[in-house]
Image (tube, grey):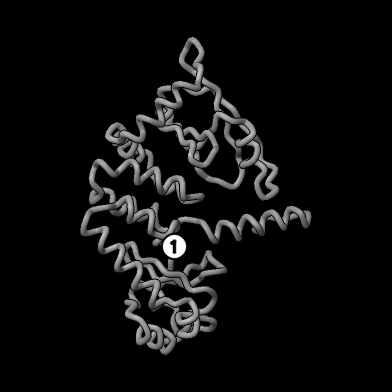
Amino acid sequence: MMKKIKTFKAFESNYIHDLFKDSHAALNKSKLIPIKKVLDKKGFPTQQNIKDITDFVNLDPNYIYFDPNNSLYPYIYWKGFIYIEFFGFLSLEAAKMMMVDKRLEYQETHINKYLSKKDYESIFRLADKKIVIPMYIETYNDIPDDQKYEVFIELYMRSEFGFEMFESDFLDKVFATRFKSPDWKKRMDKLHKIIKPDENGYIMAYRGEGVAEDILSWTLDKKIAKFFANRFGNNGKVIHDKVKVEYIMDYLKDRSESELLIKNPN
């Protein structure tokens, strides 16, 4: 049963949240519908639509999907690191308006160049934010060991949703690679200069329960936690807890959030 929304303010908040999530959520390929399963059905593209598009630009129809959870960009092309969205309806007109041919050429040229150099940091900076989490999981074993952790941090900072795709054992494996990163060591050195653990090695950390679904993110700044708790008028709550310093995996200042990545073994 659909949950009732009692006030317009609550409706507006939920609408903004859903719109934001549609635009930023990481994609789970298992929840996408291959276009061939819906072609010629009422309200969906036709075989002719697909032929027109593939004649215009070399898109493999086996990698065109319908995303039932995205009202803005319901049709996508996703093949490896190549990702293109179609606004509204899937048609030749839409493909031309969105310059799909140029976008495809740009992505293929640069991604193939980076792949030839095994430069995964550049690949993940270029890749659309909606696919960086699933593609990281899929290509993890191909990423050079000295890039694995910083690629993870790059996609982590770009992502808003989809962290549930990371299983606990996988995260343990990822965090074990942090010791290979000089940048991680610099970030942790900065953290240890500003924190003052108690006699048992604990510090206070804060977290805003709101839109974000990530359970790793905490902050040293209560105001930041409050911001995330109330973003989009969610009226979420700020929680706090004592955290043992040894459970802090990283310290991220790039977004001015004094963010802590915390993974408690319990």
Quadrant assignment for the N terminus: bottom right
Label 1 Cα crowd, 10 Å radius (few <14 / some 14-19 / many 20+): few
Local SS, label 1? helix
Camera-side residue: 205 or 3?
A: 205
Is 141 located above or below residue 99 in the figure? above
- Residue 202 placement (x, y as % from top left): 49, 18
* Residue 98 pos. (x, y %): 48, 76
Q: Which residue is mark 1?
A: 31
Look at 53% across and 66% down and name the residue there. Answer: 70
- Residue 20's spot in the image, x, y percent? 59, 57
Please identify the quarter of the rendering in which residue 170 is found. Answer: top left
Across the whole image, how many numbered discs are drawn on residues?
Answer: 1
Q: Residue furthest left?
A: 116
Q: Report the amino acid beneath label 1.
A: Lys
Q: Residue at x 27, y 52 (%)?
A: 119
On-image quarter of the C terminus: top left
The quadrant where residue 171 appears: top left
Q: Residue at x 46, y 15 (%)?
A: 201
Residue 217 percent location from the top left of the image = 50, 37
User: Residue at (41%, 31%) from the top-left corner?
Assistant: 187
Q: Residue furthest right?
A: 7
Answer left or right for 236 relative to 154.
Answer: right
Left or right: 7 in relation to 90: right
In the image, is 175 to the left or to the right of 239? Answer: left
